[in-house]
Amino acid sequence: MRNPSSLKQEFLKKWIKGLQICNSTKKKMSIMERKKIIKLSADIAMASTRKSTTYWSHALMVNASKDDTNKIIIENILENDDDNNSKGIRIINFKKASKGIIRSKKIVKKSWKISRRGRKIISPNIIAKKMVKKRTKVLKSLVPGGEYMDNALLIKETLDYIISLRVQVDVMRHLANNASYEINNPKKSL
């Protein structure tokens, strides 16, 4: 993973470029349209900073490119990236990793408590498997492209996605703090 400050700079540069493109194409927008454009340009900028080296970034680009109006934004943000090919975006078949049995002590302990409360005795392993399956399903719905990943790849992609989301939040928080400071402390003209 690259230095977070260089990721922040690259994300900010691409995000602003996407916002400028959106602003130049449509002058009058509702609040909901603005919200959609801000999110779209942030997602594309975040995914393009990873240069489609991760499955989640690739899935974000695929989802964004389904709408023809988004393709202009994608192409303009990616025009300087030699590694990306916005026209050739497609879903990759994910390899299935070997299925190993990994148990969390917390899940097994919780499953023992649940099985003791119930009337019939249920194996803690069955309860633990159901809990893991349920939580994995939720995680797959949160990570872009997660529904195509096996559990091991899902964890790796989730960690990378979280780091990229933190970069995005840090940049947006910094911009919001600077904007509010300038609003509250306008420069005095001579």
Image (cartoon, rainbow, N blue to C red):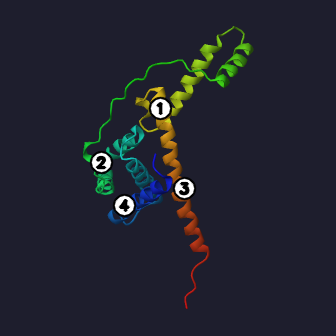
Q: Nearer the viewer, mark 1 or mark 4?
A: 1
Q: CA distance from mark 3 to mark 4?
A: 22 Å
Q: Residue at x 44, y 33 (%)?
A: 146
| Residue 154 circle label | 1
Which comes before the other along the chain, label 3 or label 1?
A: 1
Residue in front for this viewpoint, 11 or 146: 11
Percent from the top left, x then y, of residue 104?
Answer: 62, 23
> Mark 3 sits on what residue?
170
The amino acid on which the numbered mark 3 sits, given as a three-letter code, is: Asp
Outermost left residue:
87
Residue type pointed to by label 2:
Asp
Q: Label 1 to label 4, Cα distance in Å?
A: 32 Å
Mark 2 highlights which residue? 83
Dot 1 surroundings within 10 Å: few (below 14), some, or many (20 or more)? many
Residue position for label 4: 22
Q: Earlier in the sequence, mark 3 or mark 4?
A: 4
- In terms of depth relative to the viewer, which is nearer, 3 or 44? 3
SS at mark 4? helix
- Crowd tier of the residue under label 3, counting other residues whose Cα lies within 10 Å: few below 14, some 14–19, many 20 or above: few
